[in-house]
């Protein structure tokens, strides 16, 4: 029973840590990029997915 509890705890902690690092990385990169580059990237994604933006 103890092994089952430890395995369940490990299987929930690792994805949480990975998501935390991924999220912090995205926020860090987005915080240091120029505003025009973010706008252009969002604009291109909108066009690629078929959403009008003008």
Image (spheres, rainbow, N blue to C red):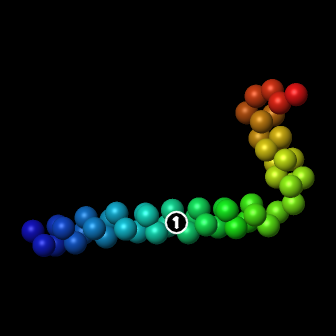
The percent coordinates of residue 52 (x first, y second) are 81, 26
Packing grade of label 1 (10 A; few <14, some 14-19, many >=20) is few
Report the residue at 79% width, 44% height from top: 42
Vertical relation: 26 (above or below) 42: below
Residue shown at the point (56%, 69%) measured from the top left: 21
Quadrant into which the N terminus falls: bottom left
Query: Residue 8: horizontal and vertical position, in percent?
Result: 25, 64
**Image location (x, y in percent) of residue 18:** 49, 67
Residue drawn at x 59%, y 62% as measured from the top left: 23
Tell which of 1 and 36 is nearer to you.
36
Q: Which residue corresponds to mark 1?
A: 20
Place of residue 36 in the rendered image (x, y in percent of width and height, measured from the top left): 90, 52
SS for tag 1? Answer: helix
Please identify the residue farthest to the left as the structure is shown.
1
Residue 33 lies in what quarter of the image?
bottom right
Image quarter hosting the C terminus: top right
Q: Quadrant of residue 51?
A: top right
- Count of marks placed on residues: 1
Residue at x 86%, y 55% (from the top left corner): 35
Is residue 41 positioned above or below 24 on the image? above
In the image, is 11 to the left or to the right of 51? left
Q: Is residue 45 left or right of residue 24?
A: right
């Amino acid at each position: 029973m103890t092994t089952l509890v430890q395995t369940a705890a490990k299987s929930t902690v690792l994805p949480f840590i990975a998501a935390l690092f991924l999220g912090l990385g995205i926020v860090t990169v987005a915080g240091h990029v120029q505003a025009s580059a973010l706008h252009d990237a969002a604009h291109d994604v909108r066009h690629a997915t078929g959403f009008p933006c003008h």
